[in-house]
Protein backbone atom coordinates (compact mmCIF):
# COMPACT_ATOMS: atom_id res chain seq x y z
CA UNK A 1 0.00 0.00 0.00
CA UNK A 2 1.48 3.35 -1.03
CA UNK A 3 -0.20 5.43 1.62
CA UNK A 4 -3.80 6.48 1.88
CA UNK A 5 -5.46 8.03 -1.14
CA UNK A 6 -8.76 9.71 -1.72
CA UNK A 7 -10.99 7.09 -3.29
CA UNK A 8 -14.56 7.20 -4.40
CA UNK A 9 -17.33 9.52 -3.44
CA UNK A 10 -20.75 8.73 -2.08
CA UNK A 11 -22.66 10.20 -4.97
CA UNK A 12 -25.25 12.65 -3.75
CA UNK A 13 -23.96 15.34 -6.04
CA UNK A 14 -24.07 15.50 -9.81
CA UNK A 15 -21.28 13.80 -11.71
CA UNK A 16 -19.65 16.08 -14.25
CA UNK A 17 -19.51 14.59 -17.71
CA UNK A 18 -17.98 16.41 -20.66
CA UNK A 19 -20.54 14.91 -23.07
CA UNK A 20 -23.57 16.41 -21.33
CA UNK A 21 -24.42 20.09 -20.94
CA UNK A 22 -24.10 20.40 -17.19
CA UNK A 23 -24.18 18.04 -14.22
CA UNK A 24 -25.87 14.64 -14.37
CA UNK A 25 -26.59 11.97 -11.78
CA UNK A 26 -25.26 8.47 -12.38
CA UNK A 27 -27.78 5.95 -13.65
CA UNK A 28 -27.73 2.99 -11.26
CA UNK A 29 -29.64 -0.15 -12.25
CA UNK A 30 -32.28 -1.15 -9.71
CA UNK A 31 -31.70 1.86 -7.45
CA UNK A 32 -34.96 3.62 -8.27
CA UNK A 33 -35.47 7.26 -9.12
CA UNK A 34 -33.26 9.67 -7.17
CA UNK A 35 -34.99 12.39 -5.14
CA UNK A 36 -35.70 15.66 -6.92
CA UNK A 37 -34.03 18.90 -5.98
CA UNK A 38 -30.46 19.93 -5.43
CA UNK A 39 -28.27 16.97 -4.47
CA UNK A 40 -26.20 17.05 -1.30
CA UNK A 41 -22.42 17.38 -1.66
CA UNK A 42 -20.43 14.17 -1.96
CA UNK A 43 -18.72 12.56 1.01
CA UNK A 44 -15.08 11.70 0.29
CA UNK A 45 -13.82 8.17 0.81
CA UNK A 46 -10.33 6.81 1.46
CA UNK A 47 -8.78 3.68 -0.03
CA UNK A 48 -7.29 1.64 2.82
CA UNK A 49 -6.20 -1.45 0.89
CA UNK A 50 -5.93 -2.06 -2.83
CA UNK A 51 -4.87 -4.96 -5.05
CA UNK A 52 -6.07 -6.56 -8.27
CA UNK A 53 -8.69 -8.62 -6.43
CA UNK A 54 -9.35 -6.64 -3.25
CA UNK A 55 -10.29 -3.04 -2.45
CA UNK A 56 -11.25 -1.54 0.91
CA UNK A 57 -12.76 1.95 1.15
CA UNK A 58 -13.71 3.84 4.31
CA UNK A 59 -15.91 6.94 4.41
CA UNK A 60 -18.17 9.05 6.56
CA UNK A 61 -21.33 9.78 4.57
CA UNK A 62 -23.31 12.85 5.57
CA UNK A 63 -26.46 11.47 3.91
CA UNK A 64 -27.51 8.11 2.41
CA UNK A 65 -26.42 7.67 -1.18
CA UNK A 66 -24.48 5.50 -3.61
CA UNK A 67 -20.79 4.67 -3.48
CA UNK A 68 -19.74 4.73 -7.14
CA UNK A 69 -16.34 3.33 -8.05
CA UNK A 70 -14.98 4.20 -11.44
CA UNK A 71 -13.75 0.64 -11.84
CA UNK A 72 -15.27 -1.69 -14.39
CA UNK A 73 -18.44 -3.48 -13.34
CA UNK A 74 -17.85 -7.18 -13.97
CA UNK A 75 -19.47 -10.34 -12.60
CA UNK A 76 -17.38 -11.90 -9.89
CA UNK A 77 -17.03 -8.79 -7.72
CA UNK A 78 -18.55 -9.10 -4.23
CA UNK A 79 -19.09 -6.27 -1.74
CA UNK A 80 -19.35 -6.15 2.04
CA UNK A 81 -20.56 -3.13 3.98
CA UNK A 82 -19.27 -3.29 7.55
CA UNK A 83 -18.86 -7.08 7.17
CA UNK A 84 -22.33 -7.74 5.68
CA UNK A 85 -22.80 -8.77 2.05
CA UNK A 86 -24.44 -6.08 -0.13
CA UNK A 87 -25.37 -6.11 -3.82
CA UNK A 88 -23.26 -4.33 -6.42
CA UNK A 89 -25.19 -2.59 -9.19
CA UNK A 90 -23.93 -1.24 -12.50
CA UNK A 91 -23.62 2.55 -12.50
CA UNK A 92 -23.75 4.23 -15.92
CA UNK A 93 -23.60 0.68 -17.36
CA UNK A 94 -19.85 0.39 -16.78
CA UNK A 95 -18.97 1.14 -13.15
CA UNK A 96 -19.72 -0.38 -9.73
CA UNK A 97 -22.18 1.13 -7.26
CA UNK A 98 -23.22 0.14 -3.74
CA UNK A 99 -26.03 1.73 -1.72
CA UNK A 100 -24.65 3.45 1.37
CA UNK A 101 -26.43 4.57 4.53
CA UNK A 102 -25.36 7.76 6.28
CA UNK A 103 -22.53 7.48 8.79
CA UNK A 104 -19.02 6.07 9.06
CA UNK A 105 -18.60 2.81 7.13
CA UNK A 106 -16.11 0.37 5.62
CA UNK A 107 -16.76 -1.25 2.23
CA UNK A 108 -14.68 -4.17 1.00
CA UNK A 109 -14.79 -5.31 -2.62
CA UNK A 110 -13.34 -8.74 -3.50
CA UNK A 111 -13.06 -10.40 -6.88
CA UNK A 112 -13.86 -14.12 -7.16
CA UNK A 113 -14.88 -14.87 -10.76
CA UNK A 114 -16.91 -18.05 -11.24
CA UNK A 115 -15.00 -18.79 -14.45
CA UNK A 116 -11.80 -19.41 -12.46
CA UNK A 117 -13.54 -21.96 -10.24
CA UNK A 118 -15.23 -23.67 -13.20
CA UNK A 119 -11.84 -23.92 -14.91
CA UNK A 120 -10.28 -25.34 -11.75
CA UNK A 121 -12.97 -28.03 -11.40
CA UNK A 122 -12.78 -28.97 -15.09
CA UNK A 123 -8.98 -29.22 -14.86
CA UNK A 124 -9.16 -31.39 -11.74
CA UNK A 125 -11.74 -33.68 -13.37
CA UNK A 126 -9.52 -34.01 -16.47
CA UNK A 127 -6.52 -34.83 -14.26
CA UNK A 128 -8.49 -37.54 -12.43
CA UNK A 129 -9.60 -39.05 -15.76
CA UNK A 130 -6.00 -39.02 -17.00
CA UNK A 131 -4.76 -40.71 -13.82
CA UNK A 132 -7.51 -43.33 -14.19
CA UNK A 133 -6.49 -44.02 -17.80
CA UNK A 134 -2.82 -44.44 -16.82
CA UNK A 135 -3.71 -46.81 -13.95
CA UNK A 136 -6.03 -48.84 -16.19
CA UNK A 137 -3.31 -49.12 -18.86
CA UNK A 138 -0.75 -50.28 -16.28
CA UNK A 139 -3.14 -52.89 -14.83
CA UNK A 140 -4.08 -54.15 -18.30
CA UNK A 141 -0.43 -54.47 -19.42
CA UNK A 142 0.44 -56.53 -16.34
CA UNK A 143 -2.52 -58.87 -16.76
CA UNK A 144 -2.11 -59.31 -20.51
CA UNK A 145 1.58 -60.29 -20.61
CA UNK A 146 2.63 -62.80 -17.97
CA UNK A 147 6.23 -62.65 -16.96
CA UNK A 148 8.58 -65.10 -18.64
CA UNK A 149 9.92 -67.75 -16.22
CA UNK A 150 13.31 -66.81 -14.88
CA UNK A 151 16.16 -69.27 -14.99
CA UNK A 152 18.62 -69.70 -12.23
CA UNK A 153 18.87 -71.05 -8.72
CA UNK A 154 15.57 -70.73 -6.93
CA UNK A 155 14.16 -68.30 -9.49
CA UNK A 156 11.74 -70.47 -11.41
CA UNK A 157 14.29 -72.57 -13.28
CA UNK A 158 15.65 -75.72 -11.77
CA UNK A 159 14.89 -76.13 -8.09
CA UNK A 160 17.68 -74.85 -5.92
CA UNK A 161 18.31 -78.21 -4.21
CA UNK A 162 18.88 -79.89 -7.63
CA UNK A 163 21.77 -77.52 -8.34
CA UNK A 164 23.82 -78.73 -5.39
Image: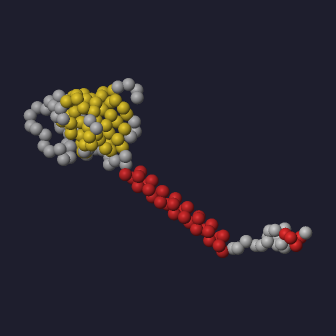
**Residue 20, position in %: x, y?**
20, 38
Question: Is there any visible trace of residue 132 in the rendered image?
Answer: yes
- Front position in the image: 137 or 52: 137
Quarter where residue 78 is shown: top left
**Residue 125, position in %: x, y?**
47, 60
**Residue 117, position in %: x, y?**
41, 52
Q: How many marks?
A: 0
> What residue is drawn where x is 37% and y is 34%?
50
- Front position in the image: 147 or 158: 158
> What residue is drawn where x is 26% and y is 40%?
84
**Residue 47, position in %: x, y?**
32, 30
> In the image, is residue 157 above or below residue 68?
below
Q: Residue furthest top?
A: 3
> In the image, is residue 159 above or below residue 39?
below
Quarter where residue 2 is shown: top left
Q: Quadrant of the N terminus?
A: top left
> What residue is drawn where x is 26% and y is 37%?
81
> What residue is drawn where x is 25% and y is 43%?
86
Q: Quadrant of the C terminus?
A: bottom right
Judge left or right: residue 145 versus residue 133. right
Quarter where residue 60 is shown: top left
Amino acid sequence: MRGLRRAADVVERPVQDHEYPGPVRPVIEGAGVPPQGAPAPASPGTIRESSDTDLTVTFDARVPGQLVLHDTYYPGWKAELDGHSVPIRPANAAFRAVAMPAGRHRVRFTYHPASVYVGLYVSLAALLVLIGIVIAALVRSRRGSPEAPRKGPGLGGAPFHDLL
